[in-house]
Image (cartoon, rainbow, N blue to C red):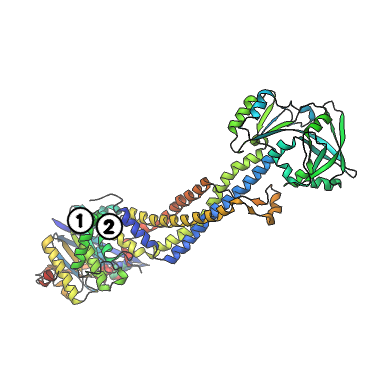
Amino acid sequence: MSAIHCMQLCKTFKQGDETITGLDHVDISIEVGEFVCLSGPSGSGKTTLLNAIGGLDTHDSVEIHMGNIRIDQLDKGSLADMRLHNIGFVFQAYNLIPVLSAQENVEFVMQMQGIVAHERARHAREILKEVGLEGMEDRRPAQLSGGQQQRVAVARAIVSQPQLVLADEPTANLDSVTASHLMNLFSRLNQHHHITFIIATHDKRVMGYAKRLIKMRDGKIIGDEKQTPVAIEDVADSSG
Amino acid sequence: MNTGVFNIPFKAMLTLSWRNLWRNYRRTLIMLAAISMAVWAMIFMTAIMRGMVDDMLHQGVANLPGHIQIHHPGFRDDPSVVNSIDAPGGELLAALNDSQTKSWTSRIKVPAVISSERDTRGISLLGVEPESENRITGIAEQVVEGRFLEGDDDRGVVIGLKLAERLETRLGKRVVIMSQDPDNNIADRGFRIVGLYKARLEALEEVNVYAARGTLQKLLKIGDQVSEIAIIDKDFRDIESLYAKIKAATPDNLEIRAWYELDSYLSSMLNVMDGFVLIWIIIIFLALSFGLVNTLMMAVFERRREIGLIQALGMRPGMIVYQILLESLLLLLIGLSIGNALALATVLPLESGLDISSVAEGLAMIGAGSVLYPNLRLDDMILANVVVIMLGTLTSILPAWHAARLDPVQAINST
Ligand SMILES: Nc1ncnc2c1ncn2[C@@H]1O[C@H](COP(=O)(O)OP(=O)(O)O)[C@@H](O)[C@H]1O
Ligand SMILES: [Mg+2]
C-alpha cells in the first residue's frame, strides 16, 4: 500500500496580475515506511508539496491519496481530523503556541487526540528529554532559543507516533550536533515504528539520512533516486 | 478517527483562552473597564430611573388618592354633590376595617368657589376626616404654616400656599366658600384659614382646599354622605386580593376602581418602564459591542499565525470558533463581575435617598420629588447580565468566524 500517491499535482499562486507556479504537474508515490528527503533550491516547491500532502492547501488539479482516502475530497473538518491523527508537522517558520510552555505545546496535540492527562505528561517529558530539552519543560517559546523551539516542534510532531511526519527544514536552526541527534531520532522512529518521513531540506547532512532523495526545481521533480542512508550513530541511543 | 467537533478537553481550552486573554493585558484591561462601566451604567441608571418612576407613581397614587376608590357611578363624570354615597356600613365597613386594609378614609369632594376680600377662585373642596386622611395622603406633613385640621367638626380650612398668594390672603384670615347643596341651593359660609400647605405639585396647592368632613356635611345638608372612599393597601403594585375582597363587600350600586383604572397614565408608565429599561440596556450594549468586536478582531489578527498553526495541527474550525468565544465569554464574565460589584457599591449606599434638590425644580414639574430613592431590582440586574452575555457572545461570533476561516498556510506564513 502506498502511503501517499499524488497525481498531476498543480498549484499556482496569484500575485496581482502575475501567476506564480508553485507545483507543476507533480506525480509522486511514497510507500509506508519510506524516509524521503525533498531537496532543491529555495523556491523550488518543497514547502508547497509538503502542504499539499498534509492537506493544508487547496489545489488546482489534484488527486491526492493517503492510504485509501482521497484527501483532496475531504472537507475542512475531516482534513483537520486526518492531520491530527495521522500526520506530525514541523513547519518552516512558525511552530509553537506562544502562551503554552514547551511541555504544554507538546501535549496540545495529544489533548486534541483525547489521550489521558498522566499519559500525556509522561509522553511529553520522555520526548522532550529525547530531543535534549530536559529541564526546559516549563519554559514558554519566548524563553527558548530558535534551535530549542525547533526541537519542541519536532517533539510535538513525533510524540504520538503518527503514520507520517512532514518536516520542513527541521534542522534549519540547529547546530550540527543537535541536527545529527535529531536525524538519528527520526531514523530510529522510521526503522522501529515504520513512521513515514518526508523532509524538505537543503542541508546535505540531512539528505545523507534519507533512503530516497527527490530533487525539485521550479515546481517539478527533476530527480528521484533510492540511496543507502548513513549509519545511525549509536551515540543517540545511549545518550537518550 | 475522532470526528467529534469538540476534540479538545474544556480545561485545555480554558487554559488557552485565559492565557490568550492576558497576552495583551493593556487592551484586556481597557476592554474590562469598558464592559464594567457599561454594566455599571446599565444597572445604576436603571435603578435611578426606577426610583424616579416609583416616586412619580407614589406621588400620583397619593394624589388620587388611594389605591382603590369607591364612588357613586356618576361621580367620576360629574363630581357634584348630587353623586354622593352613603357612609360605608355593614359588610363594606367590616371589610374596610379588616386587618388586610392598610388604611382607608372617606371624603367629600365638591367643586366650590373661594373668596378672599381681594379675589375669588374656583377650587376643589375636600371634606376630610383629618386623621385617616393624613394616613392616606400625608397632607398634615405638608402644612408649613399654622396647623392641619383637628377632628371631624373643625371649623377652619387649610389652603395651599399658592392659593393664598393668588387670593392675597394669609394665615388667620377669613375666607368665604360657596358651593351647592343637592337641591341646587347655594350653600356658603365663612372659614378661618388655620393652615397653609405646600404640595410637591404647585398645581395642587391652587386647587385643593381642605375642610373638616362633618362641617361640610352640615353645610351641604347631606347627612353622613360622602363623595368617595379611598383605600390603601400595603403595596400599590399588589392590590388584587384586597381589591377582590372589597369589591365583594361593596354594594352593587357603587363603583369600585383600582388606581390603574383611575389613572391610566400612571399605569402605562409602569408598563412602559419595563420596555424602557430593556431599550436602555441594549443601547449601552450596542455602544459596547463595537469595542468588543474591534478588540476581538484585533486579537484574531495578531494571532492569525498561531490560529493557522493550531488549525494545521488538526484543530477543527468549529473549535477555533469555540476558543475565541470562550475568550470573549471570559472577558465578559470578568467585566460583568466588576460592573455588578460597582453598581451594588454605588447604588446600595444611595438607597436611603439621594438629595437632588439642586435639580429638583425641573423634576417637580414631571411629578418627582427632591429626594430620589434608587430602586435596584434583581430582575433588572439579571436582565443586564443576560443581555451582555447573550448579545456579547453573539457579537463575538463574527471575529470567531473570521478566525476559523483563516487559511492555515497563509496564516502561518503571514508576517
Ligand atoms: N503564498 C504564496 N504566494 C505566492 N507565491 C508563493 C506562495 N507560496 C509559495 N509561493 C511561490 O511558490 C514557489 C514555491 O515555493 P515554496 O514551496 O515555498 O518553495 P521552497 O519551500 O522549495 O523554498 C516559489 O516561487 C514561491 O515564491
Ligand atoms: Mg520552503
Mark 2: secondary structure: loop
Query: What chain is tagged by disc 1?
Result: A
Left/right placement of residue A78 relative to residue B204 reads left
Left/right placement of residue B379 relative to residue B211 reads left
Q: 10 Å neighbourhood of mark 1: few (<14), some, or many (≥20)?
A: some
Q: Which residue is mark 1?
A: A65
Mark 1: secondary structure: strand
Going by the numbered disc 2, the residue's amino acid type is: Gly
Pick out the residue farthest to the bottom: A176
- Quarter of the rendering occupied by the C terminus of chain B: bottom left
Residue A24 drawn at (x, y percent): 24, 65
Q: Does label 2 point to a residue whose CB lies under 8 Å from ligand 2?
A: no
Left/right placement of residue A21 relative to residue A222 reads right
* Foreground residue among A106 and B105: B105
Residue at x 64%, y 46% (from the top left corner): B55
Going by the numbered disc 1, the residue's amino acid type is: His
- The quarter holding residue A195 reads bottom left
Residue A15 drawn at (x, y percent): 35, 67
Q: 10 Å neighbourhood of mark 2: few (<14), some, or many (≥20)?
A: many
Residue B36 drawn at (x, y percent): 49, 58
Q: In the rendered image of this protein, does residue B354 appear above or below residue B94?
A: below
